[in-house]
Amino acid sequence: MKIMIANNTHECKVWVCLLIAFSLTISSCKKYLDAKPDQSLATPSTIEDLEGILNNYSFLNARFPSAAEVSSDNYYLKVSDWSSILDVQRNLYTWQKYDLIGSDYITPYSAIEYANIILDAVPKIDNTDPARLNVVKGNALFFRASYHYALAQLYCKAYQSSSASNDLGIALRLTSDVAIKPVRSTIATTYNSIIEDLKNASALLPPVSDVKYHAGKCAAFGMLARTYLSMGNYRSAGIYADSALNIYNKLLDFNSINKTSAIPFAQFNAEVIFDCRSAAPQALASSRAKVDTTLYRSYDLNDLRKVLFFKANMDGSYAFKGNYTGQNNAAVFTGLATDELYLIKAECAVRLDRHGDALAALNTLLSSRWKKGAFVNITIAGKDQLLSFILAERRKELVFRNARWTDLRRLNSDDNFKTTLTRNLNGTTYTLNPGSDRFVIQLDRSAIDLSGLIQNP
């Protein structure tokens, strides 16, 4: 689906603004905001201008990084397929130190620049329709927070409360002023900024958006739940997951979905709360990426995800097809959907000793995934056993959704769940141990050379 800027009397002006802003943004990304160009022509002056920016899907919704999924252990590559992909993806796949990152570092910051252009323009707009302007501002805050969060999952350590005030975070961009050079914040400051933006957004947005490529209060609550979960703040994560589900809680009945379809799930399907995605990385193309064998075998025969998420290859391996992007390519769905919120609610409930709530959330989700009449409610009694089951279901449900890498990082500090990853290529074994520096990806070399940002180890 191609979403164009809204067709109205301001369309030409908006396109001019966006094209100039785009050129300035790309220039500023390449120079990493070292110099301040003349932005006078690129300054939006009406609410229609701002809405025009928000309505362009490719500028704001489709710039999320895919490096987390390329680095994760949901799949493997044959040597010939690994050899055929870009250098950056080969190095991400084998967890090598590499700093020519390119678009997975640059494009999120270009989306943040658009959000900041909106936010800097809002106070200057004639405030004749406060509610409408609030929605614009709320969306810009949501986008900025979401991209900062995505960057934090790649370019700084996993959040640890004991060291967050000292550990290096990401370079936060909170203004469109390209004269202000980026400086790396601490991890504490990074996450505080994300949370502040999301809370401010939630106060401005309607409960749900009219279109799923814009955010509503439910999406802001969902992103807060995701953020707090990555921080290990289970009480807050559970509260926000529950708040989001109180607004919107629809689940798809997988029994009603065509199992033979090459694209089983439509874009903007009923579970989607907020729609966004990455570009399609070569490594994850269905012709290359083979689903991890142990992962595939972990699905029960009565679990419909086994046929809706995967398709058989001629060589006996399996490829992923269950993308919520509605596209038959490797673009990663990075948005929010209700299934993730049920899993956050379940995990947080069991960690906080609310066993019944955890089982209720888990069974609500899984009953919609299994063949009709085959599912029996989960009744696991032990806390540790139930937590293990829920974490396994997170991997199975959120496969190829950019969630696994964050889960690996956050669980590395738990002896019960930390994981050592391995890749095998032509007789060479690559290993990623828990706590390794390679769980933090290098910043793009241009950021170091042109702006003097501190590089990761």
Image (spheres, grey):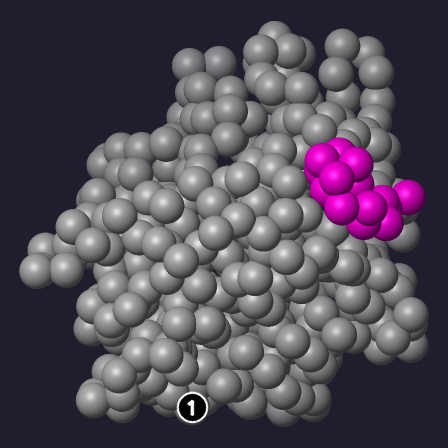
| Residue 218 visible, this orientation | no
Which kind of residue does numbered mark 1 sit on?
Answer: Ala
Q: Which residues are magenta?
A: 441-457
On the rendered structure, is 358 left or right of 265?
A: right
The residue tagged 1 is 203
| Residue 456 visible, this orientation | yes
Residue at screen point 38% across, 87% down: 204
Which image quarter holds the C terminus?
top right
Residue at screen point 58% across, 52% down: 36
Q: Position of residue 317 (x, y in %)?
A: 51, 23
Residue at screen point 25% across, 64% down: 49
Is residue 449 rendered magenta in the image?
yes
Residue 150 vertical position relative to residue 118 in the rendered view, above or below: above
Q: Nearer the viewer, residue 232 or 172?
A: 172
Q: Position of residue 143 (x, y in %)?
A: 46, 65
Number of callouts in the render? 1
On the rendered structure, is 225 left or right of 419?
A: left
